[in-house]
Amino acid sequence: MRITRALRFGIGALALALAATGCGGGDEGNALEHAEKGKLTIGIKYDQPGLGLRTKDGTFTGFDVAVAEYVAGKLGVQPEGITFKEAPSAQRETLIENGQVDFIVATYSINDKRKEKVDFAGPYYVAGQSLLVRADNTDITGPESLNGNKKLCSVKGSTPAQNVKDKYANEVQLQEFDTYSLCVEALRNGSVDAVTTDDIILAGFAAQSPGQLKVVGETFTTENYGIGLAKGDQETRDRINDAIEEMISSGAWETALKESVGAAEFTPSPAPQVDRY
């Protein structure tokens, strides 16, 4: 049978398509299957001192990093087998749903809306929302004092700033940036009057700028930090919960917390109870 040029082209295209399908377009499998191969991709923040910070030499530090490494170790993956991927607040569900990460440890508050898209292990820490201001500020003492068109900054895809406007100060002007570090820079240069997010995050930034910034007021929310993972992956969730409980009971959790935020004038919350919902 004579094969025409058009037919040869069609056969070649089909072969390429089948080859691509066979490769799966990427690394298939769930977190535990990846862990069996000695590798995990874990989402963290890159710009949160004391929690998830990428340093100038490309290494990673902070409490979230320590939790991620401990959990990975209990899944059989050594630190050199971990690939950390930046997980901005607005992209966390997408990263999980698209399979770009195996799980996320990134100050990720557990709530019902997020649980519609992803599952959570934990909590591994309970934070509370607070305010960061310049050290010479005396008129902002809590969320109610943000009325009078003061400017409040938080990050896109996060909930704290809107929470303040809805519940405490409806006159506040909200400003959103992609990262907390940009919010803190805006605070330093006077573009905003305060930054709001969880107290442990703010304490990390205050510790980086002694004498320039301070955390003020009592906490006014409860934020349960969970480890986000693919919806319906109950086996991985159970294994991560086991690891969190062991980290707490062994004393490794407390040690990691002190090493990460102990330099700040900050009293962290006690260890939480894992919720196996």
Image (spheres, grey):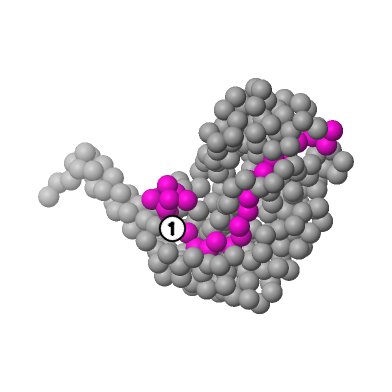
Q: Amino acid at mark 1?
A: Asp
Q: Is residue 58 left or right of residue 113?
A: right
Q: Is residue 277 above or below residue 10?
A: below
At horizontal 72% and vertical 43% (from top left) the residue drawn is 217
At horizontal 69% and vertical 46% (from top left) the residue drawn is 218
Q: Is residue 207 above or below residue 248?
A: above
In terms of secondary structure, where does tag 1 sit? Answer: strand
> Can residue 80 be seen from the camera position used here?
no
Q: Position of residue 71 (x, y in %)?
A: 58, 68
- Which image quarter holds the C terminus? bottom left
Q: Residue furthest left?
A: 1
The answer to which quarter of the image holds residue 19 is: bottom left
Q: Which residues are magenta?
A: 111-136
The question of residue 123 being in magenta is answered with yes
The question of residue 133 being in magenta is answered with yes
The answer to which quarter of the image holds residue 161 is: top right
User: Residue 106 versus residue 42: which sits nearer the camera?
Assistant: 106
> Can residue 228 be seen from the camera position used here?
yes
At horizontal 78% and vertical 44% (from top left) the residue drawn is 206
User: Residue 117 versus residue 101: which sits nearer the camera?
Assistant: 117
Q: Position of residue 4 (x, y in %)?
A: 18, 41
Q: Position of residue 108 (x, y in %)?
A: 55, 52
Q: Is residue 62 above or below residue 81?
A: above
User: Residue 198 versus residue 164: which sits nearer the camera?
Assistant: 164
Q: Residue furthest top?
A: 149
Q: Main secondary structure of the magenta part?
A: strand
Q: Which residue is mark 1?
A: 119
